[in-house]
Amino acid sequence: MISRREFLKTTGQAVALAGITTGVGILFHNRSSAKYAPILLKTGDYRVPNDALLPRLTLCHNDDAVVALNKSLDAIGGIKRFVEKGERVVIKPNLGWDRTPETGANTSPILVGEMVRLCIAAGAAEVIVTDVSCNDPRRCYIRSGVREAVEKAGGKALLPREEDFVKTVIDGKMITTWPVLKYFVQTDKLINMPIIKQHSLLECTCSMKNWYGILGGPRHQLHQKIDQSIVDLAAFCRPTLTVVDATRVLLRNGPTGGSLDDVAIENTVLCATDEVAADSRACEFLGLRGDHVGHIVLAEKTGLGKVDYRAAGYKEVA
């Protein structure tokens, strides 16, 4: 095993390890995955140490989304707990769909832009915002409003390119080795920014399901065992911070949405260091309970966090 800093210095070079890649048979858009350099290390853990004096999940309701984000973040320790001077920060919103912000299909550009601003104010050397969209990426980045918000805040909104994927050891029960967008394994800090939505296969999608957006390849195949796939990704991607967008909640026809009649205005932001707790609280906005949602229960059994978010440490702030 090597340190993350050593890893960052070396992963830009191809690593020839035929023993890992031979026979995997994963395709990326019908091209052989052998062209993607394998990564041997499990490098997705970017957590900060727990603080017994701080909650692991905070929530703020405010008509001003920026205020809601800042108050929720301050209650969990503030931005300087999570981002240090000179670090590269990668932010993972949900940018899956060619939709406008009002439809609740993608993470709010207001929140993403503010998160970029906060990271830069904390001294981050570089802030990258990226996602592997389901619809045309350029249209998703533009129509969501995220690209403009990120650039105004001083960050970089990067469209994935085929050459940006690296074959990565996920080491899960369902997902073992898979092409991953390199920014998610070549960074100092990782911030997850999902939005709460009803999902046709899951009942709800939020923090843990958002990690599907780090993957290239035929990720639709993972729907065959979707609960386990989500947990595999959540065990691999351990973010520094999770910021849940509950300003607009898509109640029906998710995850794509499209009708404003399906959207509830909740004006709420959650911050978390426990994604299981975050998703358990988030699904309540859809009238669900975390202990009745398959992937949330499985994640707790795997040791990723607590379904009982109050026991995990929960605080609501005005």
Image: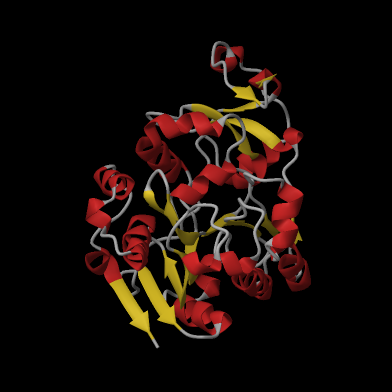
- For residue 233, above or below residue 285: above
Question: What residue is at 26 percent from the left and 48 percent from the top?
Answer: 297
State how many labels appear: 0
- For residue 229, above or below residue 153: above
Depth order, front residue of 102/67: 102
Let me know if residue 108 appears in the view: no
Depth order, front residue of 5/163: 163
> Image quarter for residue 145?
bottom right
Let me know if residue 259 appears in the view: yes
Q: Residue furthest bottom?
A: 318
> Image quarter for residue 178?
top right
Question: Quarter holding the C terminus?
Answer: bottom left
Question: What residue is at 55 percent from the left and 17 percent from the top?
Answer: 20
Question: What residue is at 71 percent from the left and 26 percent from the top?
Answer: 14
Looking at the picture, how far across and down is residue 115, in whole percent?
61, 70
In the shown orientation, is residue 95 left or right of residue 58? right
Looking at the picture, how far across and down is residue 89, in whole percent?
63, 58
Looking at the picture, how far across and down is residue 23, in whole percent?
55, 11
In the shown orientation, is residue 251 left or right of residue 185? left
Depth order, front residue of 261/123: 261
In the shown orientation, is residue 90 left or right of residue 220? right
- The chosen color scheme is secondary structure
Looking at the picture, how far across and down is residue 35, in whole percent?
71, 21
Question: What residue is at 62 percent from the left and 54 percent from the top?
Answer: 95
